[in-house]
Amino acid sequence: MTVNFLGKMTKQTLSPLYLLYGTETFLLNEAYERIVRTALREEEQDFHLSVYDCEETPIETAIEEAETLPFFGEKKVVVIKNPYFLTSDKGKEKIEHNLKKLEQYIASPSPFTIVVFLGSYEKLDERKKITKQLMNEAKVFVASSLNEKELRQWMEERAHANEVAITEEAKKTLLQLAGTNLMSLANELDKLSLFVGHQGTIDGETVTMLVSRTLEQNVFVLVEKVVQRKVREALQVFGDLMEHNEEPIKIVALLAAQFRLLYQVKWLNAKGYGQQHIASSLKVHPFRVKLAMAQSGLFSEQELLDIIHDLAEADYQMKTGVLDKRLLIELLLVKWSKANETNEQSFVR
């Protein structure tokens, strides 16, 4: 698991070869920085950290550096970025690489050098001899999107590194408010850690009080109030958005996107698709699908289609100036609530 790879790393257990690849940039950088910090003190990095780009420099140049003894200290780190020859990609530049020399180095790496292959690739071409060899000999880290369980474990590790604790309720609330983007989560966790202080505990109430919501997250809260048919609270959330000068047309677009997701999730779930399959089909994080499944269960398919139609009509009316933009959204919020209060099976047209 991703978290285990980072957590177990010590100077004594460093490998002479690392292969880091994947599309989750934050994790990729975190793994790379952890290796460098573990291997070298900050003052050593100017002399003992070298970075080469395979789209600009032949691989043998990096290998020669790896085979050269460090000037001071015991270790050096050589980073080899964009090793496109490990993939089916031809590379942006026509650089000739001596892969035979690389094969020889992988078979017998320098004991005083840590070589890190780093690439933002979704997958490698494991049919290639050089790729197979490196994957067999190196410690491999795949920076892919974390599922909900891994996200919670990652938050636990981040809090532990900050010398604080975090409750399960806090993790759940943080995911709901900050989303699944690791950069946003890291920033919020670091802020929360400073607030509770050394050996403190981050709880759900603290998260609710301190975590700043993006417009998208505020729209999610607005949808939640609609789902719960709490018209007054929905109007209050919308009023807060207006106080922060958010554009009503953008709010309508985000509402439409969220309700469209609810409809798609409900429809696919009715066809027998599971959470992971739905997430893959819609190309969204499984945690978003989990939340959408809970919300969509409170609507019929027709109700969701009617809401999407309402929002499309509101968008048109806003852009043609038929009614005041703020008033249009407020009327929709009241309409959706009243439809439930009168126990209608579909929203009033």
Image: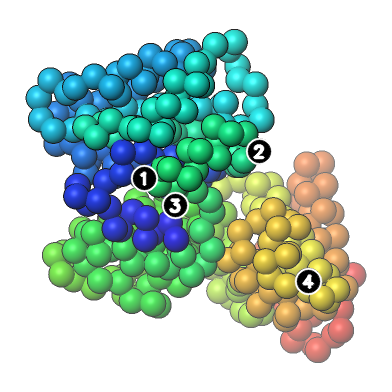
For marks 2 and 4, give the CA distance. 32 Å
Q: Are marks 2 and 4 in contact (CB under 8 Å)?
A: no
From what the image shows, is residue 170 above or below residue 10?
Answer: below
Q: Report the mark closest to the observer, 2 or 1.
A: 2
Mark 1 and mark 3 residues within 8 Å of each other at the beta carbon: no
Looking at the picture, which amino acid does disc 2 mark?
Arg
Of discs 3 and 2, which sits in the foreground?
A: 2
Judge the density around disc 1: few (<14), some (14-19), many (≥20) Cα neighbours within 10 Å: many
Circle nearer the viewer, 4 or 3: 4
Kind of residue at disc 3? Leu
Distance Cα–Cα, label 4 vs label 3: 27 Å
| Position of the C terminus by quadrant | bottom right
Residue nearest the viewer, comparing 104 with 316: 104
- Residue visible at 85% across and 67% down? 306
Give the residue at x 58% y 12%.
93
Is 319 left, or right, of 333 in this rendering? right
In the rendered image, which quarter is residue 326 located in? Answer: bottom right
Mark 3 lies on residue: 182
Residue in the image at 73% along x and 65% along y: 277
Q: Which mark is residue 31?
A: 1
Label 3 crowd bin: few (<14), some (14–19), many (20+), radius 10 Å: some
Mark sitting on residue 273 = 4
Label 1 sits on a secondary structure element that is helix
Residue 293 seen anywhere in this rendered image of the structure: yes
Residue 165 in which image quadrant: bottom left
Name the residue beneath numbered marker 2: 127
Q: Nearer the viewer, residue 102 or 85?
A: 102
Q: CA distance from mark 3 to mark 2?
A: 32 Å
Query: Which tag, 1 or 3, sits closer to the chain's start?
Result: 1
For residue 344, above or below residue 150: below
Residue at 41% x, 16% y: name it: 60
Of labels 1 and 4, earlier in sequence is 1
